[in-house]
Amino acid sequence: PMTGKNDSKNFENSLKELEKIVRELESGDVNLDESLKKFEKGIELYKDCRQTLKSAEKKIKILSDSLKEIDYKE
């Protein structure tokens, strides 16, 4: 399995690439065929980023729930 550090690096790289794609599409300098390819790539990157965030949210919930249990026991 990948470490949290790799997940973080991949997330950052995906987010940067997604931002670049958005800027390119907004510029209007890309032809229709290229725009569609970039849009499809952007959707994939968005899904990857969203999945990474969901995974992080689950980990945070688990950790905060375990902290609540510790507080409750004390």
Image (tube, rainbow, N blue to C red):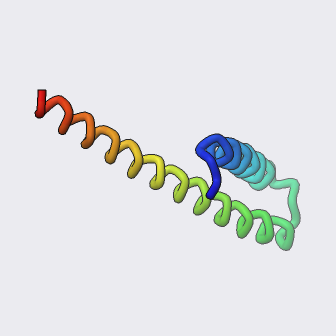
Q: Is residue 15 visible?
A: no
In the rendered image, the quadrant that contains the C terminus is top left
Image point 83% across, 70% down: which residue?
32
Residue 28 in the figure: left or right of residue 52: right
The one of 32 and 15 positioned closer to us in this rendering:
15
Give above or below for 24 relative to 41: above
Residue 49 in the figure: left or right of residue 70: right
Percent from the top left, x then y, of residue 57? 41, 48
Image point 55% across, 53% down: which residue?
52
The one of 25 and 13 positioned closer to us in this rendering:
13
Residue sticking out furthest to the top: 74
Percent from the top left, x then y, of residue 60? 38, 42
Percent from the top left, x then y, of residue 45? 67, 59
The one of 64 and 43 positioned closer to us in this rendering:
64
Residue sticking out furthest to the front: 74
Image point 59% across, 44% down: which residue?
4
Give above or below for 21 relative to 4: below
In the rendered image, the quadrant that contains the N terminus is bottom right
Q: Is residue 36 visible?
A: yes
Percent from the top left, x then y, of residue 37? 80, 70
Q: Quadrant of residue 43?
A: bottom right
Residue 53 in the figure: left or right of residue 67: right
